[in-house]
Image (spheres, grey):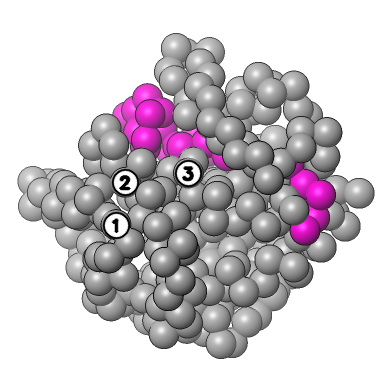
Amino acid sequence: MAYEKRMFESPDGRVLEVATVGDPSHPTVFFHHGTPGSASLVRTIEEIATKGDLFLVTMSRAGYGASSRQQGRNVAAAVPDTRTVLDALGLDRYAVVGWSGGGPHALACAALDARCIAAWSIAGVAPFTADFDWTDGMGPENIEEMELAVKGGPEYEAHMEMIGTALGDANADNVIDLFGGLLSDPDKETLAPLAARELFADSLRQGFVNGWSGFFDDDRAMMSDWGFEPGAITIPVAVWFGDNDLMVPPTHAAWLLRTIKTSSGHHYPGEGHLSIMANHFDELAADIKKAVA
């Protein structure tokens, strides 16, 4: 399956790092990577393109990889960049998939872009201001990060720089250890094959190739007003979640399902944050293919 990287320019002069997988004559799926991450992560889900006869498109969000920073961006800011990429590729109607921190950005497309016809939030987070304990059930590293993020200031920025430096040096040998208490047993099993660790580590290294600002800006965007109301979404939204997710506990999915009237829940009790997609490519590809047919 052909994997291609290229660079495009946004209307405001920023550079956008873009990757595609598959045949551009097939229906389009735009993939929003997690937090942190980069466009290279699309290689870990290329089976979706193969199994569903789909064309996968993704970009490194502003500040990640080779994409220019957009300081102060909110979640909704990803929508104009998504449209810019699709226009540059000559594409129109699309489905959107967001994993983890990419979930809110997929929901932004669902809420704000008329060309988006269906959305998937896979292990995706709810707004930080939602009416539940946002960090309850998360691993210790996430709890520490969010406690510092609420305070802000030099200590938080130093923490983000430390994480960025470590993940920027990720490799197949250390990537599991780098995530510490954030990986459940199903997630560790997903990363057991050497090839899986190599691809995942490569996407992390690429995300931090020009520093940690993308990670920092993602955090701030997630904790601020998203720039749209999830409850205003009118297209179908599939919310996938697992009970062994130590990064985004199922309480987030419960909030999204309560709030988005067009949503449907897809509960995978045994799955974690990484395994939920890796173990269900067939189902995801079939569902997307049906939506874009």
Residues at marks 1 and 2 touching, judged by CB atoms closer than 8 Å:
yes
> What kind of residue is marked 1?
Asn
Is 157 magenta? The answer is no
Q: Is residue 222 among what the camera can see?
A: no
> What kind of residue is marked 3?
Ser
Residue 98 point in image, percent of width and height: 58, 53
Q: How far apart are marks 3 and 2 (CA)?
A: 9 Å
Please give left or right for residue 210 compared with residue 79 in the image: left
Q: Where is 52 relative to 216, above or below? A: below
Label 1: which residue? 171
Please give left or right for residue 3 compared with residue 190 in the image: right
Q: Distance between the residues labelled 1 and 2?
A: 8 Å
Per the image, label 3 sits on a secondary structure element best described as helix
Label for residue 205? 2
Label 3: which residue? 40
> What kind of residue is marked 2?
Arg
Residues at marks 1 and 3 touching, judged by CB atoms closer than 8 Å:
no
Per the image, label 2 sits on a secondary structure element best described as helix
In front of the other: label 1 or label 2?
A: 1
The quadrant where residue 21 appears: top right
Q: Which one is nearer the viewer's eye here, 210 or 82?
A: 210
Q: How far apart are marks 1 and 3 (CA)?
A: 14 Å
Label for residue 11? none
In front of the other: label 1 or label 3?
A: 1
Per the image, label 1 sits on a secondary structure element best described as loop
Ranked by sequence position, the earlier of labels 1 and 3 is: 3
Q: Which residue is drawn at 31% across and 70% down?
A: 176
Q: Which residue is drawn at 29% across and 36% down?
A: 209
- Of all residues, the one furthest to the right in this rendering is 293
Residue 232 point in image, percent of width and height: 68, 50
Q: Where is 30 relative to 6, above or below? A: below
Q: Residues in magenta?
A: 51-79
